[in-house]
Amino acid sequence: NAGVTQTPKFRILKIGQSMTLQCTQDMNHNYMYWYRQDPGMGLKLIYYSVGAGITDKGEVPNGYNVSRSTTEDFPLRLELAAPSQTSVYFCASSPRTRGGETQYFGPGTRLLVL
Amino acid sequence: GEDVEQSLFLSVREGDSSVINCTYTDSSSTYLYWYKQEPGAGLQLLTYIFSNMDMKQDQRLTVLLNKKDKHLSLRIADTQTGDSAIYFCAENSGYSTLTFGKGTMLLVSP
């Protein structure tokens, strides 16, 4: 299993541009998450999904959109990039369990908005 | 809302024990977690503890939980240079989401 894969690894955007961060998992997990990690900070939840067709906002959803048309894929869309969105973005997935949910993380996408 | 607090930095010598501390605020959290992040990588689950436990040991790792004080600690015995990383404490703040602390950077010197 490849686990959680993310593309691209690194991207530079100009203010106002848009892009989609891709995330795919091959573990048949129902739960998927998008986090951002700013320098010296913990992870902030942007959006999450509990299954195909179901998404919900996290702590910092403004400026982002998501969709979940399949179990495997959970893309994150930035429509109008702003410098405040410069960050490292992590995608994660977890199985549907009764508790002790382990989240498996991808390697991250480093985004710089200039 | 929930908040998870950690000290930002810890420096130890190789072979010593490391203790990383964390406080959380959500008394309804049923699981608490420790994740490790190596430079340039994603987070990796180290261990977790169920809220009805006081202690959990896993090889060199010992997790202590004080529910009354909402205090969680991670002890790493015989710390190695390969343990140098950022360690995140997390609690399950909702049915399916986690709240992370800001992370403690552990630096192990030879």
Image (cartoon, rainbow, N blue to C red):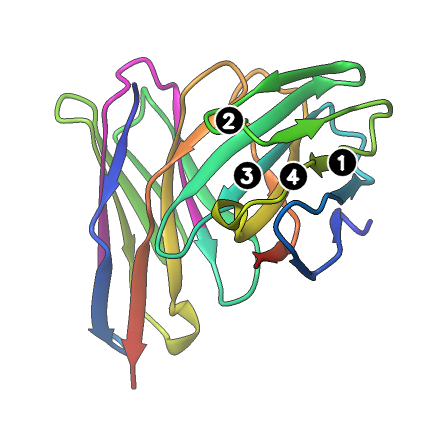
Task: Point out the image quarter for the N terminus of chain B.
Answer: top left
Residue in the foreground of this view, choosing between B9 and B63: B9
Q: Is residue A31 magenta?
A: no
Label 4 packing within 10 angstroms: few (<14), some (14-19), many (20+) = some
Return the disc, 3 or 2, that comes first in the chain's sequence. 3
Question: Mark 2 = which residue?
Answer: A100
Question: Mark 4 = which residue?
Answer: A80
Mark 3 belongs to chain: A
Please state the horizontal and vertical placement of residue A20, each as a whole percent of the image.
76, 42
Mark 1 belongs to chain: A
Residue B64 against residue A53 in the figure, above or below = below
Q: Is residue B32 magenta?
A: yes
Residue in the foreground of this view, choosing between B47 and A107: A107
What secondary structure is found at the residue carrying circle 3? strand
Q: Which mark is residue A75?
A: 1
Residue A28 against residue B68 in the figure, above or below = below
Q: Which residues are magenta?
A: B19-35
Please state the horizontal and vertical placement of residue A40, each as a whole percent of the image.
35, 55
Task: Point out the image quarter for the C terminus of chain B.
Answer: bottom left
Return the disc, 4 or 2, that comes first in the chain's sequence. 4
Q: Identity of the amino acid at label 2?
A: Gly
Mark 4 belongs to chain: A
Please state the horizontal and vertical placement of residue B18, each as a whole percent of the image.
24, 62
Q: CA distance from mark 3 to mark 4?
A: 18 Å
Q: Identity of the amino acid at label 4?
A: Leu
Please state the horizontal and vertical placement of residue A104, each as a whole percent of the image.
62, 42
Return the disc, 1 or 2, that comes first in the chain's sequence. 1
Q: Identity of the amino acid at label 1?
A: Pro
Disc 4 with disc 2 on a shared chain: yes
